[in-house]
Image (cartoon, rainbow, N blue to C red):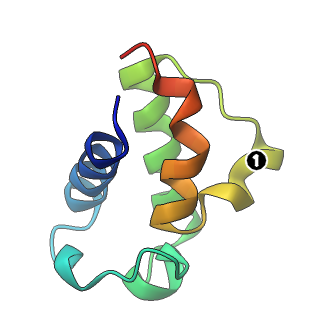
Amino acid sequence: MRRDEIKDVLLEIIGDIDEEAELNLLNPDQPLQDQLDLDSMDFLDIVMELRRRYKLQIPEEDYPELASLDGCVNYLEPKLQNF
């Protein structure tokens, strides 16, 4: 997958979790939880959906790398090369 495709998937997942999120206003390098007022369960829902869709195992110690939209894309890009 390309970076823009990964970003689109992430925005789709976030939109499913928080239907009122103004995704077009997201700052890609700022923490998602701060911008969207996501709680830890919402964050886990994002991780679980990535696991379900792409059979990814994301260790808990890697969660800080998924804090921002850019961080998510940077983390996922090498893992999703074959999709």
Relative to residue 15, is residue 10 drawn left or right?
A: right
User: In the picture, which quadrant includes the N terminus?
Assistant: top left
Relative to residue 72, is residue 63 drawn left or right?
A: right
Mark 1 crowd level (few <14, some 14–19, many ≥20, 10 Å Cα): few
Where is residue 25? Give x, y as percent. 24, 86
From what the image shows, is residue 48 above or below residue 83? below
From what the image shows, is residue 44 above or below residue 51? below
Where is residue 28? Give x, y as percent. 42, 74
Residue at horizontal 32 percent and vertical 80 percent from the top: 26
Residue behind mark 1: 62
Relative to residue 31, is residue 42 drawn left or right?
A: left
Q: Quadrant of residue 22?
A: bottom left
Q: Amino acid at mark 1?
A: Asp
Residue at horizontal 21 percent and vertical 60 percent from the top: 15
Task: Describe the element under mark 1 as helix, strand or loop.
Answer: helix
Residue at horizontal 27 percent and vertical 57 percent from the top: 11
Residue at horizontal 45 percent and vertical 64 percent from the top: 69
Residue furthest to the front in view is 2
From what the image shows, is residue 80 above or below residue 69? above
Nearer to us in this view, 44 or 57: 57
